[in-house]
Structure formats: C-alpha cells, structure tokens
C-alpha cells in the first residue's frame, strides 16, 4: 500500500492551504482520499502536516496493521526530517517526533521521497 501526498493544495508561501493525500492498495486501487484545511502556513509546514496526518490515518485503521505501507512525499526535507536523518526546524519538532514515533511503532510503515511529476494523480490534487 502507498500513500501519495501532493506538495500543497493551497497557493502562495505562506498562504491559505489544505493538505491531502491518496491511500492506495498494492494493486494501485484508491482506498482513501484525505484533505484538510490547515489555515495559513508555509509549504514545508504543509508537507510535515500532511505526512503527520497520513501517519495517524494509517495508524488508526486496524485493518492496515501489519501491512507494508509507504508514504510517498515530494518534499526531500520533510522526508529526511521524518526519517530522522536531519532535525528539521524548531517550530515543527513536535510533529516530527510524533511522526518518528508512529514510524517506530508500525512495522512495515516507511516514508520515501519521489518527485511530484512521477505521480500525476497526487499532482492533480495539488492543483
């Protein structure tokens, strides 16, 4: 299963923004779409909030327990911070540590980077 996260649905940096993603099963079938208004935020905060929301949606679904799930983001920084390869920015530290906790607690859950142009569906959500 994978979760594709669009960069940012809102416009501007900072500006009004929504976050969203697509949960798919291993055959590519859409299992869940999510989108939430987050207010006025900068794009890196939106990225971290999106990964955070995806982690908690996945962890709250008992039918997903024990499955191999990859969260795919087009933000190298957010992915690096979530995976513990870097610290991130101070204002996001609580979200980042929470994401890391979910990753440690769910076997089979991972977060990876992929360029936006490799996922036209998530890219269309962002536009």
Image (cartoon, helix red, strand yellow):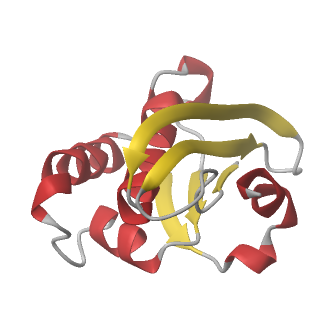
| Image coords of residue 48 (percent x, y) | 38, 55
| Image coords of residue 104 (percent x, y) | 28, 49
Residue 30 appears left or right of 34: right
Q: Residue at x 66, y 33 (%)?
A: 34
Residue 42 appears left or right of 57: left
| Image coords of residue 88 (percent x, y) | 20, 70
Q: Residue at x 20, y 54 (%)?
A: 92
Residue 17 appears left or right of 5: left
Residue 124 seen: yes
Quarter-wise, where is residue 22 in the image? top right
| Image coords of residue 16 (percent x, y) | 50, 45
Residue nearest the observer in this picture, 81 or 36: 36
Q: Residue at x 20, y 77 (%)?
A: 86
Q: Residue at x 83, y 58 (%)?
A: 124
Residue 99 appears left or right of 72: left
**Vertical placement of residue 60 versus 50, above or below:** above
Residue 52 seen: no
């Amino acid at each position: 299963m994978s979760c594709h996260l669009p960069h940012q649905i809102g416009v501007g940096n900072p500006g009004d923004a929504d976050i969203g993603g697509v949960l798919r099963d291993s055959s590519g079938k859409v299992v869940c779409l999510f989108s939430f208004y987050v207010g006025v935020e900068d794009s890196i905060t939106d990225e971290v909030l999106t990964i955070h929301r995806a982690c908690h949606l996945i962890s709250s679904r008992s039918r997903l327990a024990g499955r191999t799930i990859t969260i795919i983001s087009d933000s190298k920084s957010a992915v690096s911070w979530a995976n513990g390869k870097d610290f991130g920015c101070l204002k996001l530290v609580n979200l980042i540590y929470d994401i890391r906790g979910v990753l440690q607690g769910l076997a089979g859950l991972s977060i990876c980077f992929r360029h936006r142009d490799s996922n036209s569906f998530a890219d269309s959500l962002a536009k």
